[in-house]
Amino acid sequence: MWAALTEYFYNPNMIDYKHHTLIHMRERWNKWRSILYRQYAKTCGSQEEALKNKPDAVANKEDWEWCVNHVFYTAEFQKLSKNNALNRMKKSMNHHSGSKPNREYYYEMGGKEGTPPTIDQVFFETHKTGDEIKEQAAKERFAGLVETREANPDLEPLELAEKCFGEQNHGHIIGYGGGLRPKDLKGSDALSRAELASQLRHSNGEKADMATIIADQAKLISEMRVMMERMDQRSGAEEGRGAVGAAGGGWSVGGAAFGGWSGGELLVAGVLGDLLVVLVVSIVEGSEIEC
């Protein structure tokens, strides 16, 4: 599926989106498959009738036959369907938001401005009838959410959900709907607080090391400037040799000060921006140096 997708879309950092894109594709397929089964297969009396009830949305007859024979009427899928139906019957709370996803509520209630609502605010919007929550179970859960959040304002959203609804270990988190799973916040893809603290300590350590390096460089540059001044003084007292003599007293290029020569060597030392440059050039008497 990924290979097929990359044939139609291009991004220089495409691989960075692979994981989340494939998860989204799987979610969309599961929802579409559920709609097809509920409307075009489950309503039929038998597998043979379902084969004849191809929806218009499935253009290819062979694709529909594959779905019926290899997905909808397998023992595994039938068992899963029955279990899901029983679980829905056991629900003590029903949301009243229809097909509107929770993430749309988060977006409309402040998420687009960077101030998303709390879980209890979204819970109220998705479970209310009119201007109030009428189901007793939902009303009690909502009151618990508000009380827990106000008593523990520093709780993360997942921690708040688990404190009020128990461990979130299924395909969604109560209050978030689809699209965000518990393992996204506490599994291998998420950083624990300990890991975040460790990263912060490591970052602070790197900053401290960098500050030490900068201080050492500043000290070295200061010492080099003193050395160059001494060399300037000494070279000024000596006679220049050949074409090099003009350079003996030192010069500057682009704001960088350079030192003079001594004996058969020319010491070139300077500071270009933050870069310390030191060169020792052997001089052959009578040779010329072009600068």
Image: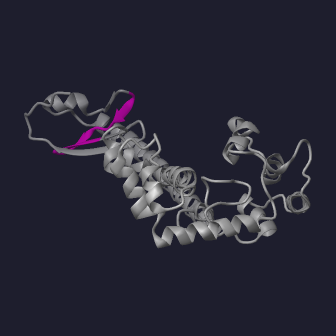
Residue at coordinates 79% horizontally, 48% vertically from top-left?
96
Q: How is the image coloured?
A: one colour
Query: Can residue 1 be seen in this snapshot?
Result: no
Percent coordinates x, y for residue 158 in the rendering: 71, 62
How many numbered marks have been drawn onto this rendered protein structure? Answer: 0
82 and 130: which one is in front?
A: 82
Look at the image and say whether residue 258 sits in the magenta stretch.
yes
Confirm whether the magenta stretch covers residue 184: no
Left or right of 87: which side holds 190?
left
In this rendering, the answer to whether 217 lies above or below 140 is above
Residue 81 picture location, percent across and down: 58, 66
| Nearer to me, 207 or 234 | 207
Query: Which quadrant would residue 135 be assigned to in this image?
Result: bottom right
Residue 95 point in image, percent of width and height = 78, 52
Give the residue at x 76% y 68%: 90
In the picture, the quarter occupied by the C terminus is top left
Q: Which percent across, then down, holds residue 187?
A: 57, 68
200 left or right of 209 in image: right
Using the rendered view, name the quadrant where residue 58 is placed.
Answer: top left
Residue 92 placement, left or right of 206: right
> Is 117 rendered above or below residue 81?
above
Residue under the image location 82 percent in, 53 percent down: 120
The magenta stretch spans which residues?
255-268
* Quadrant position of residue 154: bottom right
**Magenta-colored segment: predominant secondary structure:** strand
Viewer-proximal residue, 93 or 274? 93
Q: Is residue 136 visible?
A: yes
Which residue appears at 24% of the width and 40% of the height? 261
Q: Is residue 42 left or right of residue 172?
A: left
| Looking at the image, residue 61 lies above or below residue 291 | below
Front residue of 147 and 284: 147
